[in-house]
Amino acid sequence: MSRAKNRAKPKRSSNPILFAGLIALLAAVALYFGLRQPEDSPVKPQASSERAAAIAEAAKQPSVIDYARLDQRLGRLMEERDMVGLAVGVVEGGQIRFLKGYGETVEGNGQAVNPATIFRWASVSKGVAGAMVAKLADQNKLGLYEPIAKYSPSLRLPGGAEHRARVVDVLSHRLGLFGHAQDSKLEDGMDVRYLRMNLATLNLICPPGTCHAYQNVAYDASSEVVEKVTGKPYQDVVRDQLFLPLGMTSANMSMPQLLSAPNWARPHVGGNPRPVEVTDSYYRVPAAGGVNSSIKDLAIWMQAQMGLMPDVLSPRALESAQTELARTPGELGRMRKFRERIKTAAYGLGWRIYDYDGHRVVGHRGGVRGYRSLIMFDPARKSGVVALWNSSTNQPAGLEFEVMDMIYQMPPRDWMDLDKIIERPPAQPEEVSAAGP
């Protein structure tokens, strides 16, 4: 299998004085660019002493991640049969310290993936909806505990339960429906508003607000909440109030914008990956799975979730989005391979919250046909990892555990299964819902 050559591995200086000076210089650069707003941003530049203090404090932390080893491990991962292209970013101490692409945008085409290559986020997009609604609530433009019926014109639940279900119940998957309700019909091309109204014909498995079951069609009612409050399309509001103020210039939420990008990764499926056409199913539920961007912009998004951009996302908005609302024991079953690290699992507003061997981490995974994604970070340490890849294999999912183990200075483990011969089932070629792998 042909692969594009990887760039040189990042090296760390062996001179402690030089290294300290480099960290100080990086902190100054990060502070300067962090405080600047894009020229087309609707948010005026603010000299945020809170942001400056957060970045300066984070920059004092010594590096604990072995980036040379990480680069070597990712190079080995790309030798696996199921891999085509991969982009990885690491934020440590509040700073983006690693951004790199591996492999190709299309199998055999020779175009190398780089930090500017566009991928799909799939269900990592749910955190955008959670943050956007939490931001509007922080501005007193809506109430998180108000009935969802007040804001969503198309969501209908059995027995009129939309009048009892609250905005937070939509964003934490606590509507009382069985999991993935109407996803298959969404993938068949049916109108999403009709599908949301048709949810009323189903049976509730519990009263709203009392149990967790993952949704996509219903979750996208959160986009209608944003539109009701602002009077503007969801995609425009997210662009103007989140993406542009954060400097995420490649981020968007449409299939035409993905296809027209000069540097984007094509989706691949199957055990011997083959390129397939992009499907539009989850672009029609943008709050659930519609975001595209480069790995650089996903890393910037992670910085914002760590509290480093308080003029865009306030501490109160982040607290609302990242607070545990529902226990998710089923997630522990799906992540049984990592149970040595993951002790508890819960869900907030578009975010999963874990006890990682005594540390509180936040994250999510995503998957649509031919794409996978992940994000995991420790808000207190301002450190974490993001990854995007264009094939159906789940093997890179172990990457987040290898990086978090480095952050917590734990003994290295082969979470990506690179050091042992194992029998892996072939990746499935059919559409995978935006729930993630």
Image (cartoon, grey):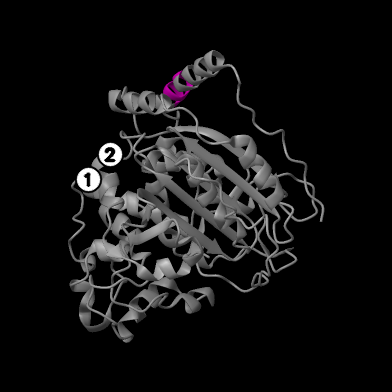
In the figure, is residue 230 to the left or right of 88? left
The main secondary structure of the magenta stretch is helix
Residue on which the image places disc 2: 314
Q: Position of residue 392 (x, y in %)?
A: 63, 64
Residue on which the image places disc 1: 138
- Disc 1 + disc 2, Cβ < 8 Å: yes
Q: Secondary structure at mark 2?
A: loop
Amino acid carrying mark 2 in the image = Ser
| Figure check: 94 above or below 297 | above
Chain-order first, disc 1 or disc 2:
1
Q: Residue at position x 73%, y 44% from top?
A: 112
In the figure, is residue 164 to the left or right of 76? left
Residue neighbourhood size for the residue with mark 2, other residues' Cα within 10 Å, grouped as few (<14), some (14–19), many (≥20): many
- The stretch of residues the image draws in magenta is 28-33
Is residue 263 something that shows in the picture? no
Amino acid carrying mark 1 in the image = Asp
Q: Residue at position x 50%, y 17% from top?
A: 20
Residue 353 in which image quadrant: bottom left
Residue 195 colored magenta? no
The front one of 245 and 389 is: 389
